Amino acid sequence: MRNLPNLRDDRMLIGYDTADDACVYQVSDDLVLINTVDFFPPMVDDPFTFGQIAAANALSDVWAMGGTPTMAMNLLCFPNCLDVEVAGEILAGGSDKAMEAGCTIAGGHTISDDEPKYGMCVTGFAKPEEILANAGAHEGDLLVLTKEIGTGVLTTAIKGGEITDERLERHVVDNMRTLNKYGAEAARGLKLHACTDITGFGLAGHLCEMAEGAGLTATLHANRVPLLPRALDMSRMGMHPQGTYNNRGYFMDRVTFDEGVDQARADLMYDPQTSGGLLFALPEIDANLLVDRLGLQGIRGAIVGEFAPREEGAPFVRVVR
């Protein structure tokens, strides 16, 4: 495979070098542009809800970078065998979340495909001093997570018929379609050093990228990580999507688990999330204040770990009880 050409210039502040959530381009001395794209196939049956979740997931990257989503373009792959009304419902769900975010949908592109897929290319803006990279954590920073973990194992269990509780299904859906706008707003004015959103690589995987980028070791306290109801039960039953095993294999050389960590809980640290929460790195006093602010908004935030200096040969993430 050919090497990618180096087309970066001094105005490209963040590219693909550190596996960040979006690219950041300096427009002027006091304005930067944030651009990202994300789309995927349905994880729920209802097309409107699918549109909401996919849009919330795509918009999230801009908040993870410290910006505000401003404009989006729809990306829709759609089979000819489905009624066009289904496509309309998907796009309506996306529009609903874009409107909630204060983001304008300016158009998009549709192609024919064997399976529906939907998402957005999102553009946002921020001041240069507001930008958050995933690699900016400092020694001694605490980690605050803004959403419960477990959407991967629970959606797998729901599709497999292991969960038929409609209230639980609604709770899982609400978790996925809740905008990270509210977690980002709660963090404004605090001394934030780094941020990422938790998606396909799972909590341990995305935290590994943060730690590796910062050259530090992160300790993740598995028992402090907020879990969705019955996520632990389904993990014990082995209701894991393939992504869990892929994540474990990919990060196993950089992430270690203490013997005291229950296997079912350990597996959930690799559970691939759909439209997961934000993970902030910030000083202790600000971390405690952020958890309080999240609570006032009805968000179950939690301090789940901390950063420390990394010794040579040490893992980037150490998961403890």
Image (tube, grey):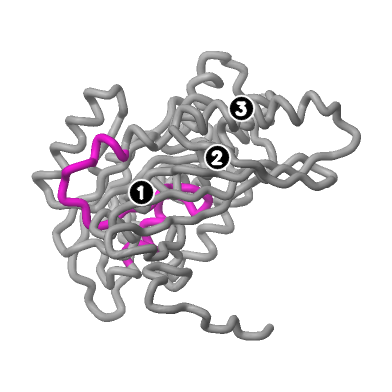
**In the image shown, does 289 or 237 lie closer to the viewer?**
289
| In magenta segment, residue 194 | yes
Give the number of the mark in front: 2 or 1: 1
Judged left or right of residue 217, residue 88 is right
Q: Quadrant of the N terminus?
A: bottom right
- Distance between the alpha carbons at the discs numbered 2 and 1: 27 Å
Q: Position of residue 134 (x, y in %)?
A: 34, 60
Give the number of the mark in front: 1 or 3: 1
The residue carrying mark 1 is 67
Judged left or right of residue 116, residue 209 is left
Q: Position of residue 260 (x, y in %)?
A: 31, 50
Range shown magenta: 184-211
The residue carrying mark 2 is 152
Mark 2 or mark 1, earlier in chain: 1
The residue carrying mark 3 is 93
**In the image shown, does 254 or 307 lie closer to the viewer?**
307
- Distance between the alpha carbons at the discs numbered 3 and 2: 21 Å
Q: Amino acid at mark 1?
A: Gly
Q: Are marks 3 and 2 in contact (CB under 8 Å)?
A: no
Give the image quarter of residue 53. Answer: top right
- Distance between the alpha carbons at the discs numbered 1 and 3: 23 Å
